[in-house]
Amino acid sequence: MFERTDRLMRSFAALLAILGGLALIAVILATVTSITGRALLWIGLGPIRGDFELVELGTGFAVFSFLPWVQINRQHASVEIITMHMSDGINRLIDLVADLLMVAIALLLTWKHWQGTLDKFAYGETTFIIQYPLWWAYASGLVGAIGFVVISFWCLVLSVKALVTGRDQAQGEIVR
């Protein structure tokens, strides 16, 4: 059961990261197309209308979509100059505290993002050029933020298990 849940969580984080990557590819293609259109104004082409608005939407979605992948693979920036000289047990305790703090941060970030989404929805604010509702961009980021909460909580479970069993969890690998 535990291994199945771990595979599911890792697959979920990977799916969000892949979707974020696809969004970035779309942003790149839109940017290249728009710049090319600007360069070829003399033959009747032009930029994509609202290109920077689309870049903001896609990039925001991508950033939030990558957070669960980074968390489940323990790839956040860390400074190990002191902890590398500590025992495995102390390092597991530090990991547990760090994961607890990450859950708190993920919850706060998602809660405030949810409030922002509701706010943009209530006011009906739209982008300046292509007039799409801003809450769409917020809601797309909320998908990754909720995934970040779920994955952060799972990492906390993994840290508790590692502390209790005295065995480290493999980073970026499915627990067997």
Image (cartoon, rainbow, N blue to C red):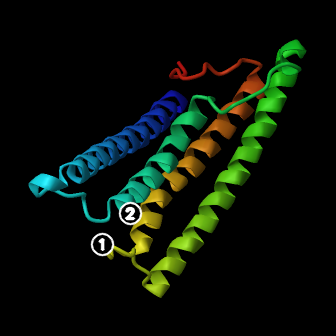
State the residue lying farthest toward the front: 42
Question: Residue 89 sits in which quadrant?
Answer: top right
The answer to whether residue 24 is above or below residue 134 is above
Give yes or no for contact between labels 1 and 2 (Cβ–Cβ under 8 Å). yes
110 vs 69, left or right, is right
Along the line of sight, which residue is nearer the eye, 164 or 87?
87
Local packing at callout 2 (Cα closer than 10 Å; few below 14, some 14-19, many 20+) is some
User: Residue 83 in the image: x percent, y percent?
Assistant: 85, 20
* Residue 106 x/y as whole percent: 65, 52
Position of 50 compared to 160: left or right?
left
- Image point 30% across, 72% down: which residue? 130
- Using the image, tell me which numbered label, if any, was put on residue 27: none
Toward the bottom, the furthest residue is 123
Residue count near mark 1 (Cα–Cα under 10 Å), binned few <14, some 14–19, many ≥20: few
The residue identified by callout 1 is: 130
Tell me which residue sits at (56%, 48%) in the image.
148
From the top left corner, tell me how far across and down residue 96 is, in percent. Answer: 77, 35
The amino acid at mark 2 is Glu
Position of residue 96 relative to residue 174, above or below, is below
Q: Disc 1 to disc 2, how far (Cα)? A: 8 Å
Q: Which residue is drawn at 75% across and 44% down?
A: 100
Q: Is mark 1 on a helix, strand or loop?
A: loop
Looking at the rendered structure, the secondary structure element under dot 2 is: helix
Spot the residue most to the left.
43
The residue pinned by badge 2 equals: 53
Amino acid type at image mark 1:
Ile
Reply above or below: 161 against 45. above
Side (left or right) of 85 relative to 67: right
Residue 45 in the image, given as x and y percentages of width and height: 14, 56
Give the quarter of the image for residue 127.
bottom left
